[in-house]
Image (cartoon, rainbow, N blue to C red):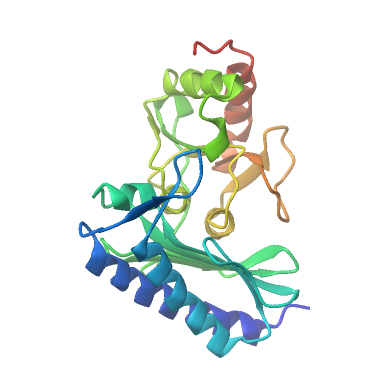
């Protein structure tokens, strides 16, 4: 059974840690001295990632020493537990590294592989997005709600993809198909901000193609608690943890329309 006291305490710790880390990142914005390539797919790490991670991990360990932490840079910290913290200390590092102010700190608390607390802090705007299971989603303490639009063809659709699929023919074809059949397709390279925008009603849908990472579950909880649907491409509700999922998210009114769009787009030959 979920311990509500633990959830509420974890929420407060996550908010405190995200704010502290975010402010430290903000102080370093546009002053990056060193950018290190993490892999052959173009992902990078900066001193801001490491500083923010250290701040967040310290806060979690002080409050919950028996909980396991999985962090973007440090990896797994602690022994296996029903409680696991997923930390992306700087979601949008590539944006940060080139001086584009679109990034966040993301912290998710998982219980038995389901998100129960999600916190996303955007330091450049001082916007704090947070959700707890069964208690709704909020932006700076204002309740969020996904919105329904007349048609997704007139809507804004967010695209999120994994680092390894930039030239995947199916991904390219689907991306192009969506881009030409909605008002605007958004690729922010800061997924937690896109999930938060959908929960807040500023985006109309998200299509996620094989995107991995510790930044996934805070946003998914945010959208679900704001009344949105998060489902696999084949229509089954998304639950648990998946290493490389294929997802669509939107207002429940648009599930079928978005699924048809995705299925048609995946059958279109890509032009590489």
Q: Position of residue 136 (x, y in %)?
A: 54, 65
The answer to whether residue 59 shows anywhere in this view is yes
Q: Position of residue 204 (x, y in %)?
A: 45, 39
Q: How many marks?
A: 0
Query: Could you say which quadrant of the image residue 49 lies in?
Result: bottom left
Residue 172 horizontal/vertical position (percent): 52, 21
Left or right relative to 1: residue 188 = left
What's the residue at 47%, 54% (across, down)? 145
Task: Place residue 9 in its image quadrant.
Answer: bottom right
Q: Is residue 254 above or below residue 32?
A: above
- Quarter of the image for the N terminus: give it: bottom right
For this orientation, the residue located farthest to the right is 1
Using the image as rendered, state which of residue 31 and residue 66 is in the foreground: 31
Along the line of sight, which residue is nearer the eye, 204 or 238? Answer: 238
Which residue is drawn at the image coordinates 30% and 51% (left, top)?
97
Where's residue 68, x and y in %?
66, 75
- Pick whichever, 127 or 96, lies toward us: 96
Instruction: Work out whether residue 85 or residue 184 is closer to the camera in this orientation and state it.
Output: 85
Q: Is residue 130 left or right of residue 100?
A: right
Residue 68 higher or lower than 101, as above or below: below
- Rendered residue at 61%/35% (across/down): 255
């Amino acid at each position: 059974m979920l311990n509500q006291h633990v959830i509420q305490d974890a929420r407060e710790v996550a908010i405190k840690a995200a704010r502290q880390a975010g402010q430290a990142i903000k102080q370093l914005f546009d002053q990056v001295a060193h950018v290190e390539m993490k892999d052959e797919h173009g992902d990078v790490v900066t001193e801001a990632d490491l500083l923010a991670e250290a701040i967040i991990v310290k806060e979690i360990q002080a409050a919950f020493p028996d909980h396991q932490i999985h962090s973007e840079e440090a990896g797994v910290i602690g022994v296996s537990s029903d409680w696991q913290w997923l930390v992306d200390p700087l979601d949008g590092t590539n944006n940060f590294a080139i001086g584009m102010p679109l990034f966040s700190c993301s912290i998710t608390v998982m219980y038995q592989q389901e998100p129960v607390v999600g916190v996303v802090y955007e330091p450049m705007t001082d916007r704090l997005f947070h959700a707890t299971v069964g208690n709704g989603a909020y932006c700076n303490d204002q309740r969020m709600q996904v919105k329904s639009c007349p048609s997704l063809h007139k809507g804004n659709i967010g695209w999120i993809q994994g680092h390894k699929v930039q030239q995947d023919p199916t991904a390219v074809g689907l991306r192009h198909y969506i881009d030409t059949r909605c008002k605007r397709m958004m690729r922010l390279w800061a997924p937690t901000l896109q999930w938060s925008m959908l929960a807040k009603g500023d985006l109309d849908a998200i299509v996620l193609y094989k995107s991995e990472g510790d930044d996934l579950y805070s946003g998914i909880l945010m959208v679900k608690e704001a009344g949105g649907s998060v489902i696999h491409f084949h229509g089954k509700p998304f639950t648990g943890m998946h290493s490389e999922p294929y997802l669509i998210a939107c207002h429940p009114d648009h599930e079928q329309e978005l699924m048809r769009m995705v299925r048609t787009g995946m059958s279109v030959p890509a032009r590489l």
